[in-house]
Amino acid sequence: MKKLIGGITLALVLVGLSAAPAAAQLHGNAVYPAMPGTGVTVAADVALGMNDDAKISGTAGLESPMFIGGRITLGLPMFSVWAGAGPTGMGVEGVDSEIAFGGGAGFHVLNAPMMPVTVSIQAGVGYLSETGASLLNVTGGPLVVINVPSPGVSVKPWLMPRVQLVRASFGGVSDSEVGFGASGGIMVTAPMGIGAHATLDWYTIGDPSVKPMHVSAGLHYKITVPSLGM
C-alpha cells in the first residue's frame, strides 16, 4: 500500500472520499480540546476546508468539504472528557458523506481559581469507516488557555500544538504516518451558559509541503452541575 502523502488517506480515496485530508479526531473538523472548567457543555460545530490542500475532488472539480456535528464535554476539577460525531465530506458533488466519530480527554496540570493561564495535557482519537476501509486518527499535545478578565462573560483564547498519527486500512492492508499540527481559537460564554466558539486548524503529515487548514465555528451551552465542584 502506498504511503500516506501529506495526510491524504489512500483508503478513503478508494471508497469515495477522494483525496480527503485526515485532519482531526472528527474527520473534517478542526481539532478541539477537552476544555477545562467543571460542568457539562453541549456544542454544535460547522467546519470548512480553507485552502486547496484541505479540499477534495468532486465531479465539479476541487471543492471544499463541510463538516456538521456535535460534541459533549464533561468537565471535572482535574480533567475533562469529550465525545462527538457528525457527517463529513458534505457539499461536494459526487462524493457521499460519511459519519465520523471522535473523543478526547485532558488532564489539567495547572488549573486553579483566578489563575490567568490554564495548562493541560490533551489526547484524542477519531474513527471513520466505509466499505472495508477505515481511518484511525490519534492526537496528543499540550493545551494553553488564557482566562481573560471580563466581568460577566467568560472569554478563553486557547492554543494546542500536537503530534498526530494517522492510520489507514483497506482490504486487510494498513499504513501509518506521523506528523504535526496546531489548532487555536476562542470560546466565549455568557453567564446563562450560552456561548459561541471559533477555531483555526493547521497540520502536515508526510509531505511537508502539504498543509491543510480548516476553520470551524459554532454555538455551545454550558450546564452548571454543582455536584461536580462548581
Image (tube, helix red, strand yellow):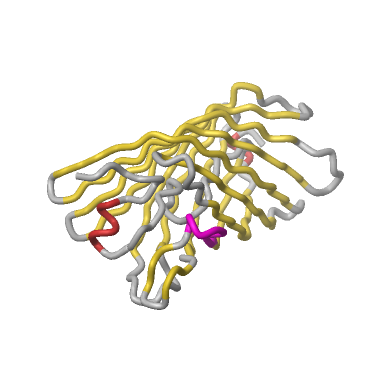
**How far across and down, in percent of the image, does residue 122 sit?**
51, 32
Going 63% across and 55% down the picture, which residue do you hit? 221
Quarter of the picture holding the C terminus: top right
Q: Quadrant of residue 229?
A: top right
The answer to if 228 sits in the magenta stretch is: no
Relative to 173, residue 120 above or below: above
Compared across the picture, whether 228 is left or right of 63 comes to right
Going 36% across and 51% down the picture, which residue do you hit? 8
Compared across the picture, whether 114 is left or right of 124 comes to right
Between 66 and 118, the one nearer to me in the picture: 66
What count of labels does the image hold? 0
Identity of the residue furthest to the front in this view = 209
Identity of the residue furthest to the right in this view = 151
Identity of the residue furthest to the top in this view = 109
**How far across and down, in percent of the image, does residue 144 sit?**
65, 32
Between 6 and 164, the one nearer to me in the picture: 6
Between 109 and 58, the one nearer to me in the picture: 58
Going 55% across and 62% down the picture, which residue do you hit? 46
Region in magenta: 47-54
Going 68% across and 48% down the picture, which residue do you hit? 187
Quarter of the picture holding the N terminus: top left
**How far across and down, in percent of the image, does residue 92 sit?**
42, 72
**How far across and down, in percent of the image, does residue 126 sit?**
38, 45
Relative to 106, residue 65 above or below: below
Between 91 and 224, the one nearer to me in the picture: 91
Compared across the picture, whether 182 is left or right of 174 comes to right
